[in-house]
Image (cartoon, rainbow, N blue to C red):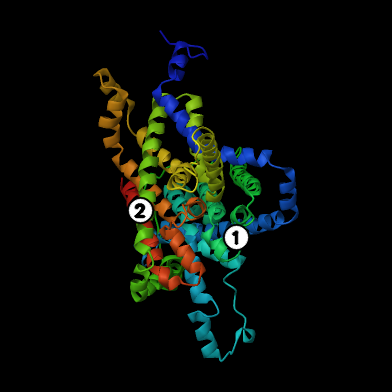
Amino acid sequence: MRQPVGLFSSYTWARWRPDGWSLGVFAIAAFTAAPILAVVVLALTSSPDIWAHLAATVLPHYIHSTLVLMTGVGVGAFIIGTGTAWLTSAYTFPGKAVFEWALLLPMAVPAYIIAYVYTDLLDYAGPVQSVLREVMGYRNARDYSFPEIRSLGGATAMMTLVLYPYVYLLARSAFLDQSNAVLEAGRVLGCGPWRNFFTIALPMARPAIVVGVSLVMMEVLNDFGTVDFFAVQTFTAGIYDVWLNMNNPAGAAQLATAMMVFVLLLLAAERIGRKNKRFDNVRRSQPRSKTRLTGVRGIIVFAACLAPVALGFGVPVWVLGKYALRFYETSLNLSLLTSALNSLMLSGIAAFAAVALGLFMAYGVRLNGGRAIKSAARLASIGYAVPGAVLAVGVLLPLARFDNAIDAAAREYLGFSTGLLMSGTIFAVLYGFLARFMALSFGSAESGLARITPSMEGAARTLGASRWSVLRRIHIPLLRGSLLTAVLLVFVDGMKELPMTMLLRPFNFETLATFVHQYASDEMLEESSLAALGIVVAGIAPVIALSLSISGSRRQ
């Protein structure tokens, strides 16, 4: 007899019955979402005079700079990412096999590092302008005009060079999945290559491209090192300035809340753009026919694909490698090893903790798949869409309350002060990392579990295995690849993370990211080149793994 599925049926009650897994998911969700909620609460309960002062002074400039930067980087990433994705998926030309994975390499270079490199190259005292003055006979800057790298336009160019792979990756996957029959039908109807692209291929790939551009814009909102080095007053730089330089946590919380509204509007715009639209796609029934380009056209396409790889990866690695070889003895004497160990420790602990909690949540959702527990898991994953500076404000607020309460109790009942137990410690940095990167670990674990048939779990439970035993003996071995990918992604993101680390780190505690930022800000890129190169090398690992994964899936 069929079981009832009403709201108060025994089936529904069994799925919603509290147990250790569901309570654990709710606890993890509350733990990771607390920083965001703390920021909103402080912003709404603070004096409105602070907001009025910010709105009358710096807020309009923050909004203008942030919008211009997001728009510029989004458009640039769309043009480069979509263009190269179409060229590598629809044409055959010299070097195509290399460019398929090489176009992902700039993703390994943090935006703030490429900003330091190009400032060193293009500034007035750099080699480019020095050679220009020598060749042309100019005596000083008044004799010629040269674009200012430390500007809003310079920040836009730097971020575009390293963020376009987000669009390239998703757009190329969408182009490769498109039906060859549909594109051939367009050609039969008289569409040339360009018209075929703009009227058929591009509209069909729109959802993937929009997601890629949205990711790029959220990365722009999260950036601090580039905008701080170029003195571009965005929301992230404003939060840092209001909090630390003006000593105004309430004002920083209000700016952070306004920044989160930016993120919500960005996500809403993406949803509205897809509302009432269908993007049906007929799967390929035959291999895609690709046009072979030779001669001048092949050279042009080769150059078009080479330019973003050379500018976004080749030049920074070449400059940093040259400096690292020349100044490695000086670099090793500047506490580099201590900073590297700190980065490895923080990123390693955060990676394994995030994966453990993400796996627990994903398995809890699998066991108790009710709407409430799914919503809690999604809430725990929202931190990745929130900029690091916002999370840093939210992490310190509850930790400061906890420290003050413990200190007050110790003074009253024990007669001594406990000081800061959580705020300004490594725990605060790890808390921020977990709140931000939980989405990566949960998403990897959830997608891996979705590929495991429930019959395997049912068979094990029938044989008397507990849920923990099933997870340990069946799921974890099958999820090894997904979990290792999640560990790698969280580890590399932790190595590159700058705004949260700068705001939450203990006193006199440096990581590779803060080490590079400190010395590069003091015009000492050469001394920090070895540390910067280490961050780039660490970022290459997930790019290689991603490329191999894509190649393997295409062969299958």
Identify the mark nearer the N-term, 2 or 1.
1
Q: Quick one: label 2, few (<14), some, or many (20+) residues within 10 Å?
A: some
Q: Quick one: label 1, few (<14), some, or many (20+) residues within 10 Å?
A: many
Q: Secondary structure at mark 2?
A: helix
Residue at point 57%, 66% (across, down) = 230
Please state the horizontal and vertical placement of residue 25, each as a whole percent of the image.
44, 29
Horizontal relation, residue 233 to residue 466: left or right: right
Q: Is residue 191 visible?
A: no
Horizontal relation, residue 48 to residue 319: left or right: right
Q: Nearer the viewer, residue 433 or 204?
A: 433
Give the residue pinned by disc 1: 72
Position of the C terminus, as image quadrant, is: top left
Image depth: mark 2 or mark 1 in front: 2
Give the residue pinned by disc 2: 344
Q: Secondary structure at mark 1?
A: helix
- Residue 408 vertical placement versus 49 (above, below): above
Horizontal relation, residue 223 to residue 17: left or right: right
- Residue furthest out toward the top: 1
Q: CA distance from mark 2 to mark 1?
A: 34 Å
Please state the horizontal and vertical placement of residue 446, each as a whole percent of the image.
40, 35
- Per the rendering, the mark at residue 49 is none
Amino acid residing under circle 2: Leu
The image quadrant of residue 299 is bottom left
